[in-house]
Amino acid sequence: MKKVISIFLSLLLLTGCTFVDINKSPTMDIINDVLSKKVQLYNNVFEGYKFYAPRGLKVIDKNKYNCKILSEDNVLYLYVDVVSYYYKAKNTFNVDKTKFLSEIINFDGNSGYIQVTEVNNKYFVELMYNYSKIESYIEKDSLNETVLNMTYILSSISYNDKVIETVIHEDALDLKEEKFDIFESKTEKSNFLQALEKYDNYDEVYVSEDQDILEYNEVE
């Protein structure tokens, strides 16, 4: 029998715990719930930034500001845009109502967006927030779980201003040549994969174990 995975997001409040069944929740509600928690955990530290990857996720490849994160059968592609962060670039994303989901995200002074495009009976998911972006090509039934993990990662990213200022000045030429735009949505999965082809040589990274706030309940 095929396993049905029920995943609950545990939202810890001062007055107790609230559980949200993400399989039945609107995708935007999941994003807003996670953002409202203001996650300050981290278990991955890289040059100029750090972030929290929920339990079950593993950074498998890294090249400067690009990471490949494995989540069961899905791969999440993370791009951290330190240039946009340094210059506090404005969100230029335009909502596309022809997509399965296309919405602007505004929370606590940070702007972003989510766009979900149906491609070959799957979803191409783009989530941008906090001057970083994650994209993934997934099965439709894993949309909310994927968005949950993406939101935790992006909302937890913390920047080291001193390191980034040094990087901006020392690597100005390399950063100027970078063509990937976090504010530009892709219409096809292949476009994003082509953009990542030049990041084939990744560094091996150590991923520490950390306590998570997700609860996984498997039902046969």
Image: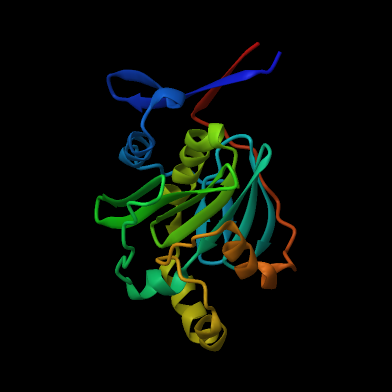
Residue 29: x, y in percent? Answer: 33, 34
User: Could you tell me which residue is drawn at 58 percent across and 51 percent down?
Assistant: 44
Q: Is residue 187 left or right of residue 45?
A: left
- Where's the N terminus, which quadrant? top right
- Where's the C terminus, which quadrant? top right
Residue 210: x, y in percent? Answer: 59, 36
User: Which scheme is used to colour this image of the protein?
Assistant: rainbow
Q: Is residue 207 left or right of residue 31?
A: right
88 relative to 147, above or below: below
User: Could you tell me which residue is drawn at 41 percent across and 51 percent down?
Assistant: 115
Q: Quadrant of residue 198?
A: bottom right
Q: Nearer the viewer, residue 73 or 57?
A: 73
Q: Nearer the viewer, residue 147 or 141?
A: 141
Q: Quadrant of residue 128?
A: bottom left
Q: Nearer the viewer, residue 56 or 96?
A: 96
Residue 25: x, y in percent? Answer: 38, 27
36 relative to 104, above or below: above
127 relative to 37, above or below: below
Q: Nearer the viewer, residue 134 or 88?
A: 134
Residue 127: x, y in percent? Answer: 44, 52
Residue at the limit of the structure toward the bottom, as seen here: 173
Q: Is residue 159 left or right of residue 2?
A: left
Count of labels in the image: 0
User: Could you tell me which residue is drawn at 68 percent across and 39 percent down?
Assistant: 73
